[in-house]
Image (tube, rainbow, N blue to C red):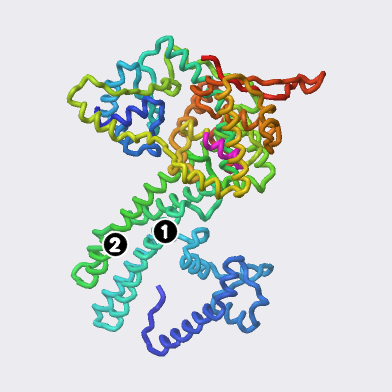
Amino acid sequence: MLQHGPLLERLLAGDFICRITDEDAYRHLSLEQTQQDINHYLRPLNRRLVSNDDQSVYFLGYYELNKEAREQLSQQFAQTVQSLLPLLEWLQLVQETLGRDSALTAGDTIKLQEFVLRTEDNQSLRQRLNTLASDRFFNSQSEQLDSQVKLIFRRLKEHGYLLQPHADRQYYIVTGKIDYLIDVIRFIRDEEHLPVEDTPQQEALL
Amino acid sequence: MAPLDPTPGIASNLFNTGAERLALLGKYHKQLMQGYLDGYVDETAFSEGALKKLIAARILWRPDEQQPLALRPLVSELIASMVADENRRQINADVAEKLEQIRNRVQAYRDAQYKGDYAVAELQLQRLTEHVHDLSGQFEEAIDSLWHRLNSDFGFVSSLDDKIRENERAQKQLRRLLDGLDLLDFTELIELSEGNNHLRKLLVSQLQSQLSSHHSSLLEVQKRLVELLAKFRQQQSRSLLISNMVAFLRQHPKYQPADYPNRSELPDLFNQASAIRPQAAIALDKASERQILAELVRALPRQVAVTLSDTPSASFSELLQDEEIAARQLALKTDVENFYLRVIDRGGSLSALEYLTEQQLPWDSEIWLYQILAEYQALPASEKQMFRLQREESPASAVNSLYLIRDISIGLQAA
């Protein structure tokens, strides 16, 4: 267990471990033996290893769902639901601003400066960014584009959606937590039978 | 099958015409390349004679009376292959025709040998070699094109939908190529080459090894194409999911999903435990670790007491200040210090302004009071207690409750 000390500490701290955030740790976590070892170790702490459906990201959940755990999870869930729209809007905004033909996925790199430059010259993007920055999730008080963007990216980094490899260099890598977010949306969509399609219409193909 | 004529006269005629026509490609390379890009050629860019020559050389043609002149498809294809233009590169997956030609050539070669016509046999063998290389080259070209498209992530088309369509097209081509490879029956080729070393080398050892390597390349390409298509589709569905979900949430701002955390069967996705941050402190109960602890303590950065000598600070302020001002300030300071000394001598309370007039000191009364207050504040707490400071204050005016200090009295505090 000793060799997994740092990994356990990160997991206990609530970090999501994916191929991007920690490749070695992720590889270890993909082994069944390690999963068993870690779960065994975490048992007295009422924690266990949880992953999303395609096992691209690991995090800790409760082993036993007692009252406190449920309360905490309800709170967590409320926050997640509240953050859905701002996060999705951000994904959309980045995709459109950078002229990408697909949504961001784990491992994609975003250069902050490029994002700022492209937003600067475009009134409608600027407007959307302004609205997004003042959303409760990001909660920016600034009117300056530069500080709005910096704040948005910092918040996303704090929430684990982005990784900044060098603290003094303004580029970010999208982590596997984005996959988690997409899974959450897909789950809610399926569960509630929301009219939200994700396959192209046949007419569109023809 | 075209009749073969090995007579040197016609061959040299062929050579001359071919060389001449190839030269046309070079001579008009810019105009022709523009024609490739535009889809038609600008007839005004050529002289009438040149146009005639190009048409006669089957480089340009007019597909229809109303249409402008354009490059012949074979020429376009040649350019597409030369510049690896994946938008226009063609893959020829027709293996059956090639096989048929190979069979015929082998027959013609054997017939010539049988008749003892060695010159013809030699020529037939040469044509046969070309066909075999052609067959292999056809696969090579196709594989090259497929890899090129894969490695550029189908970057030659811009939208994801186009990429998906291109990928599907490539997969169809690939299946046709694989079907073509299946047509090649090596037992047949072995039979064809029976008893002849040249044929065996060409048709069996060479072709077989080439085709088997093509086969494995094609399978690898196929695997990668399928993977890439899956990735494209995943990206497509993700983009759609995001935009449709955004639209939904905007339309239903009060939307609240079911209370998953309180379900009896909690979905794993929503089981995200609160953070535990392990804390640790130094333990002193292990004697064996004392040594290490002592080293750690020693390694701590020490708080070095800052003892500033007088000299650097004095020179520092001199650098910044005018010498005259510094001298005046020093004089003021000395006078104030004398005032405090007088207070200590007298024992009783002493008014600052009275002292100022009494000693006929040159200071402005306000500055004088400030300096006395500043000096008082600068005293160490223990010494501050020794003095009693009394302010003589009055309101600024009847309507303003701001108090102005008129005078200060300092006295020794009764111990």
For disc 2, the marked residue is B210
Residue B30 found in image quarter: bottom right
Question: Disc 1 is attached to a residue of which chain?
Answer: B
> Where residue A18 sits in the image (x, y, percent)?
39, 35
B26 vs A78: above or below: below
Q: Assign the magenta stretch its main secondary structure.
A: helix
Compared with B378, A123 (above or below) is: below
Q: Which mark is residue A48?
A: none
Residue at mark 2: chain: B
- Residue A44, image x, y percentages: 30, 16
Specify whether residue B230 is in view: no
Please state the horizontal and vertical placement of residue B45, each as a whole percent of the image.
65, 77
The one nearer the camera, B375 or B193, is B375
- The amino acid type of the residue labelled 1 equals Ala
**Res. B93 mark:** 1
Total label count? 2
Quadrant into which the N terminus of chain A falls: top left
Q: Is residue A36 left or right of residue B250?
A: left
> Viewer-proximal residue, B191 or B292?
B292
